[in-house]
Amino acid sequence: MNELLQNTGRDTAGLVYLGTNQTPENRQIVIQGNQKRVSKMRRVLLAAAYHIQEYMQEGGFRCRVAFITTTYRPDAEWMPNQITGLMDCYRKWCKRRGAVIRGVWVLETTKAGKPHYHIALFLPSGLTPPKPDKQNWWHYGMTNCKWAYRPIGYLAKYASKGFQHPLPKNARLYGVYGVPRIALAYWRAPAWLRKMASPSDDIRHVGEWWENRTAGIAYRSPWIIDGFGPDGILLIWIGWNYEDIYFL
């Protein structure tokens, strides 16, 4: 994949033409669903944390990072809207104090299959977040709050653990607050597209197409699914032809 771009010598508004027919047959990869989700989660969470930290420092704010863990009682049932409700409580709490909620959360499961959440809130110095269970924001179990002095390293630790035990059905693995959509879209995009874009580009995923609205070019994925097996999804590199790229 190092030679994705092949310049044909034509000068057409910066368009780089991409070949398809000279791809070796061994350009196949097996994607493991869980591994792929964890890899994407780690990439997006760390990028979001760096973005928040740099934004607050460039704005002249001194900030601290609170790490909040929420757990479930044995008799409490997980529901997908519970973390959304809790984060909405923190959003309103920040707004009342003239701050904007910025942070991330990660879902994990215990060996017994019980879910719990780790939340990182980036807050201006002087603000201390309340414990959710003490505020009746979390009715499903206990919570714990502490300050993190190395927040990026702490997040990297949890973002690398993945999930060795099944997640609840339809559960989101992570969430991000206070980061511009453009910044998140770049880090959520596949690796082949990030090689042809920059973090400031406006990337959109529309059906089968990936649009770089800043560059004004749309691409169809150069990979296709060739089957499913016990080790994961088999993808084959097919490259591009002129019908797979167009100007917006």
Image (cartoon, rainbow, N blue to C red):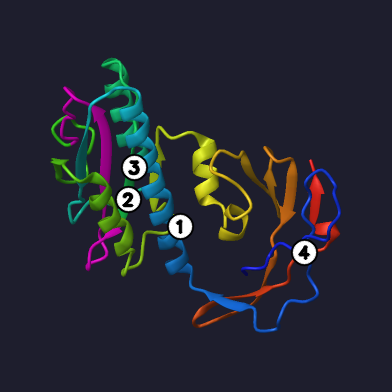
Residues under numbered marks 3 and 1 in contact, where contact means CB atoms less than 8 Å apart: no
- Mark 4 packing: few (<14 Cα in 10 Å), some, or many (20+)? many
User: Where does the image place residue 60, in percent across and percent down from the top left?
Assistant: 30, 22
Q: CA distance from mark 2 to mark 3?
A: 7 Å
Residues under numbered marks 2 and 3 in contact, where contact means CB atoms less than 8 Å apart: yes
- Three-letter code, disc 4: Trp
Dot 4 or dot 3: first in sequence order is 3
- Residue 118 on the magenta segment: yes
Q: Is residue 80 visible?
A: no
Q: Which element type, helix, strand or loop, lies under badge 3? A: strand
Q: Which element type, helix, strand or loop, lies under badge 1? A: helix
- Residue 98 on the magenta segment: no
Which quadrant of the structure image shows residue 75? bottom left
Observer-nearest of 135 and 44: 44
Dot 3 or dot 1: first in sequence order is 1
Q: Residue at the spot x=77%, y=62% of the render?
A: 18
Q: Which element type, helix, strand or loop, lies under badge 2? A: strand
Q: Say the numbered circle drawn on residue 240.
A: 4
Residue to which mark 1 is pinned: 40
Residue to which mark 3 is pinned: 104
Q: Say the numbered circle drawn on residue 178.
A: none
Nearer to us: label 2 or label 4: 4
Part of the protein shown in magenta: 108-132
User: As drawn, which residue projects farthest toward the front?
Assistant: 9
Dot 4 or dot 1: first in sequence order is 1
Residue to which mark 2 is pinned: 106
Q: Residue at the spot x=30%, y=36% of the render?
A: 86
Quarter of the image with the C terminus in it: top right
